[in-house]
Image (cartoon, helix red, strand yellow):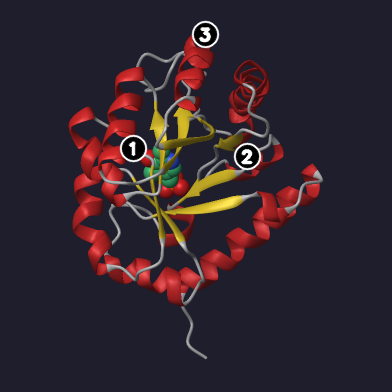
Amino acid sequence: MMSSEIADNAERIRQRIRQACERAKRSPDDVNWIAVSKTRPPEHIREAVVDAGLTVFGESRVQEAAQKIEHCPTGLGWHFIGHLQRNKARLAAALFDCVHSIDSLPILQALDAAAGQQGRFLDVFLQVNVSGEASKFGVAPAELNGLAMAAAGCRNLNLCGLMTIPPAVRNPPDARPFFRQLFDLSQSCSEAVGISNLGLSMGMSHDFEIAIEEGATWIRVGSALFGRRT
Ligand SMILES: *Cc1c(COP(=O)(O)O)cnc(C)c1O
C-alpha cells in the first residue's frame, strides 16, 4: 500500500472533526472542511484530491490562485479566504465559487457587478472583526446587519454566512469567546435580514475543534494537512 503523508494527515483531521462533533452533539455532515492550499504547489493539491478525497480548497491570493488552478484537477471548489481588493474583484469572480472575506459595501458591490458581468453566481461570507483589533480586516459588529442587508439584495451573490479570524492566542480554548461572539452575531443577523441558518466560517489548524464546538459550519484548515508553511 502506498502511504501518503497528506492522506494520513487528512484521516487524523477527519477523526478530530468527528470527535469535536460528538462532544458538541452535532453531525459531521454539517461541518465542511476547506483545505487551505495557499503557498502549496499543484502536485500537493492533486495528492490531497486523489489520496485524501478533498474537493474544496482555499486560497488567499487571487494572483497565486490564477496561476495555480489551471494546473489542478478540474471539478474542485475554490474558496477565496484572503483580503479582497476591488481591483481583483473581476478575477476573483472568475476563479472562485465562494468568497469568505467581504467586509465593506464597495467590495460587495464590486464583486456583485463582476459576477454579473461574467454570468457567475457566487457564495459569500461577511468577515467580521469580532475582536476589534486594528490590525484585523472585517466589518465591525455594529455595521454587520447593514452590510448583510445589502448582501442579501445582491443579484449575483448568495449570502451564506459570517466569517472571522480570532486573535492569535497561545491556547486554542482562548479563542472560544470570539467564536461564540460570531455565533451570537449570526443569530441576530439572521433575524435582522430574514435569512435562516447563516453558516459560520471559523476555525483553523490550531483551533478548529473549539470552532466546531461553537457552531462552525466551514473550517479552514491548511497546515495540519499539508505541513507547516515555510
Ligand atoms: C492561512 C489561513 C487559514 C489556514 O491556516 P492553517 O493554520 O494553515 O490551518 C485559514 N484561514 C485564513 C483566513 C488563512 O489566511
Vertical position of residue 191 compared to residue 70: above or below: above
Whether label 3 lies within 8 Å of ligand 1 gets the answer no
The foreground one among 112 and 216 is 112
Give the residue at x 67% y 61%: 15
> Which residue is tagged 1?
82
* Amino acid type, label 2: Ala
Numbered badge on residue 45: none
The answer to whether residue 61 shows anywhere in this view is no
Crowd class of label 3 (few under 14; some 14 to 19; many from 20; radius 10 Å): few
The foreground one among 137 and 134 is 137
Numbered badge on residue 216: 2
Query: Where does residue 162 sit, x and y in percent of width and height?
Result: 53, 30
**Quarter of the picture for ligand 1?**
top left
Give the residue at x 22% y 28%: 86
> Which residue is tagged 3?
142
Q: Quadrant of residue 121?
A: top left
Under circle 3, the secondary element is helix
Extreme-bottom residue of the structure: 1
Q: Earlier in the sequence, mark 3 or mark 2?
A: 3
Whether label 1 lies within 8 Å of ligand 1 gets the answer yes
